[in-house]
Image: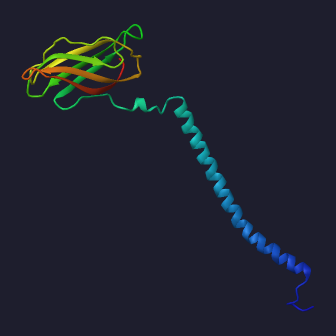
Amino acid sequence: MHKNFRTQENHRFSVYRKFTKFSGKSQAALEFLMTYGWAILVVLVAIGALAYFGVLSPDKFLPSKCTLPAGIACTDFKVTTGATLITGTVDIVLRNGMGFDATSVEVGVEGCTAKDNTPSTIANGAQEQYTATGCTVTSGSKYSGDINVTYQNADTGLTHNVQGSITARGE
């Protein structure tokens, strides 16, 4: 028989050999994808579980802050929980940097039932503490609310209202 003469059986063998040549590469690629696919799936499930149970809660990583517009600065603040849900307090220390005395000062905080207007005057450059009571604060959780400061310019007699925000953890 002649060497170059192909029979039906020789042809099948060459087709099988070509197929096995490619299937080895395909199998390696498939194993690579499956291995890393399972690893990625396990990582995603772990992250999902941590987020579901609150371990990755962004409230735990956000800093406490108190912001007001220029002129009135919130130099210190404290959110305190009470014996019941609505007996918490928010203490805020305000500094007057507006260049004039502020009279008839009243401080209100969102989520609190009582505003504070004592002391009623903040001299230019001075600071005073105000306490809003009847606040809904949960122990250990973040409190976030708006601050409304109403004051009167001692030089002109005009009344102004400024708004800021406070974010802090209840103590």
Q: In front: 138, or 111?
A: 111
Q: Is residue 95 left or right of residue 81?
A: left
Q: Residue at x 72, y 70 (%)?
A: 22
Q: Residue at x 86, y 76 (%)?
A: 12
Figure colour scheme = rainbow
Q: Residue 66: image x %, image y %?
A: 27, 27
Where residue 149 appears, as percent x and y from the top left, is 23, 21
Image position of 118 with respect to 70: above or below: above
Q: Residue furthest top?
A: 83
141 or 73: nearer the eye?
Answer: 73
Q: Quadrant of residue 140?
A: top left
Residue sitting at the far right: 1
In the image, farthest residue toward the bottom:
2
Quadrant placement of the C terminus: top left
Q: Position of residue 18 (x, y in %)?
A: 77, 74
The quarter holding residue 98 reads top left
Q: Is residue 64 left or right of residue 85?
A: left
Q: Nearer the viewer, residue 100 or 155?
A: 155
Q: Quadrant of residue 82?
A: top left
Tell me: residue 94, above or below residue 83. Answer: below
The number of discs equals: 0
| Percent of width and height locating residue 156 | 8, 23
Q: Tell whether 101 sits left or right of 19.
A: left
User: From this viewpoint, which residue is outermost toward the left?
Assistant: 155
For image coordinates 90% across by 92% down, the residue present is 2
Q: Quadrant of the N terminus?
A: bottom right
